[in-house]
Image: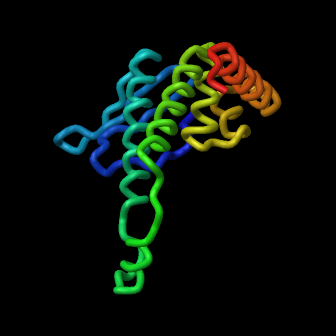
Amino acid sequence: MNRPKRRKSKDNPYTLLVINNKYYVEFKDVKNILNTVEVTEKQFEAFNEFELEDKSQMNKDERHKERSEVYEETLYKRANLIYGSIEDDFIKKSRYEDLMKAINELPKTIKRRIKMFYFEELTTSQIATLEHCSDRMIRKSLEQGRNKIKCYFEKNKLI
């Protein structure tokens, strides 16, 4: 079974596959021949993390591209925008780091499902298909994950 297609960098030469609970990396070699190699779950997760980092970077790049015509009026409006303070940026970054620490303390299955739902933006039914379980089970895992993250924040006095 293939994973849902994910937008990826043109420089990314491989495709990740899960077939019958086995993990594969598919790529074309220099002779343009398609190769499929079975990998361990840990290696698969490493490739998956690289893909997520690529996707995140592409999203950042997209957000910073100029989307409108640059006229004197739009430049004037931008010059008068009030930007957040350095303190606000620091707080946002530290909150994100706290969230990632909380996610990393979750059990493996819940962590994987939280990442698929919130970072890969898959639906609960897509995750259920990938995980070979019910949609209800995925929703329950996500709820457990959110509760554990909330407890982590309360325990560490981050709320």
* Quadrant in the picture for residue 56: top left
Q: Residue lying farthest bottom?
A: 72
Q: Residue lying farthest left?
A: 30
Task: Depth check: give the residue in front, 43 or 92.
Answer: 92
The number of numbered discs placed on residues in the rendered structure image is: 0
Q: Residue at x 57, y 27 (%)?
A: 99
Task: Depth check: give the residue in front, 103 or 129.
Answer: 103
Q: Percent position (x, y) of residue 57? A: 37, 46
Colour mapping = rainbow
Instruction: Using residue 57 as the reference point, say whether residue 106 is left or right of it.
Output: right
Q: Percent position (x, y) of residue 69? A: 38, 82
Vertical relation: 90 (above or below) 158: below
Q: Residue at x 62, y 23 (%)?
A: 158
* Quadrant in the picture for residue 52: top left
Q: Percent position (x, y) of residue 108? A: 59, 15
Q: Percent position (x, y) of residue 66? A: 36, 70
